[in-house]
Image: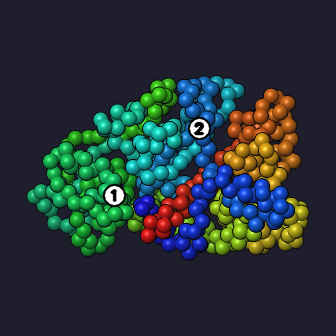
Amino acid sequence: MRLTSIRTTLFFMGLGLATVPASSVWAARHAKAKVAKAAHKPVAAAENPQPDAAPASELGDAPFDPAKPPARLRVLVAQGASTYFIAKGKPHGVEYAMLLELEKFLNKQKAKGAQAVKLQLIPVDSGELIPMLKNGEGDIAAGLMPVNDAAKTLVAFTQPYLTDRWCVAQNRNAPATDEPFDKLLLPGASYGKRVLEDSGKSYEEAPLGSSSEKLLGGLNKPGADGKATLASRYVLDLWSKRFPNVKVGNCIDQPGSVAWAVSKDQPVLKDTLDRFITQQGPKLAETAAKVTQRYLSDDGAVPTPTQIDPIDKLGFFAPAFQLVASANNLDWLLLAAIGQRETKLTPMVRKNGGPTGVMQVNPQTARKMGVTDPHGNEGNITAAGRYLAYLRRLFDNAGVSDDDQLYFMIAAYNAGEGRIQQLRRQAAKQGLDPNRWQGNVETVARKSVGPRLLDYVNTVSRYYLAYQKAGKGAASDVAAK
């Protein structure tokens, strides 16, 4: 069972997502869609959900070149209440904040005229970081990872961006103890267990699904009599304003280094990350903590894009997204991701012309899709869904891969199908592959349209991937039960 929050699981169950995996097996079902198309069946009759938004690495086995970086670097980032999470419809977390700065640095290092590099963040459980990196499923691993000798045999760690300590945390009113490091309560995946074992101390393992942040949230409750825990001083400081009733006690004398990791086969990538970390110094982690604090959850649980609050409207719009997606054989999370990018799921109605509604649909496009009133939520989302289905058919060509079809759909939703087809023709004239977005049509778009379209495609993809990961975790929980 994945350690996702019960609230996430129940919410996705309520939307019926538990029976439909968000991380779809696109290739296997794509053939069924073509058979259905050949039989002149309606689009909704074919099982054809959208592909996973996480592309394969463009770096591959080639050595990293900071002057001419690949268009994408995959970053395996630990999904957690401190490291990476979705709050108010947007990604946050200390690792997210630091990785944004890294992306800026990488693009400053590239040669003039070289393509920009984007970090494709792939949220995973913290325990999967090293195995997935070793297996080639990512180019960088990030997740407040303590450097240890065992992991050094598998991957290459960067220079530390943080020197941390492990300290006892308890309720402010709890009585002092003569043995501060004895019988502490620790979550199963906590590195603090190894710290205590190295110090010859015993501990008690917390129930399945616990995390350091959740334990701290429990200790913060007035009158809490829960057992003390051992936590990272950096994490304790990060949550200090959210959990004022948690007292920091004794700390283990031995400090620890926290760093990112890359494959041992990518020494130049490691050197590049080392230069960035050295240039940033202590302010990298400190600033990340400051910008993250305001978005932390109230109880230490991992915020998700599915939590319903006055700001995040995903819960409100989900039924409409699902209904329209089902009718047009789409993944409703793709509609949600586009709506999030367009308006933060807050309808912006313009009845005097121009894009309108939660999905910012052009009224002329809506009419072509058979929708006469694009301003209301129902009509607006219906028009968007039909238009995406139309774009999927438009880019359903033999030479276009499943992933590229998705990228062309997103790009055309923003810039119009005519503009994207024009960019594809320009790519062909320049000797590039008109059927590939990344590194090909994308390169032409960067020069002729500018970075705005590329940013749109990347942002929608990031939202979509984050929504997929949250839904996949909830579905896995239900299946395990």
Which amino acid type is marked by label 2?
Answer: Ser
Dot 1 falls on a residue whose secondary structure is helix
Q: Give the residue furthest to the left.
A: 178
The image's mark for residue 57 is 2
Q: Residue at x 22, y 60 (%)?
A: 204
Point out residue 21 in the picture as x, y percentages from the top left corner: 58, 62
Point out residue 427 in the picture as x, y percentages from the top left corner: 81, 34
Left or right, 333 with respect to 74, comes to: right
Report how far apart the C-alphas of labels 2 and 1 lie in the structure.
32 Å
Left or right, 168 with respect to 355, comes to: left
Dot 2 falls on a residue whose secondary structure is loop
Q: Residue at x 50, y 51 (%)?
A: 123
Which amino acid type is marked by label 1?
Answer: Ser
- Quadrant of the frame with the N terminus: bottom left
Q: Residue at x 66, y 53 (%)?
A: 28
Point out residue 177 in the picture as x, y percentages from the top left corner: 13, 61
The image's mark for residue 212 is 1
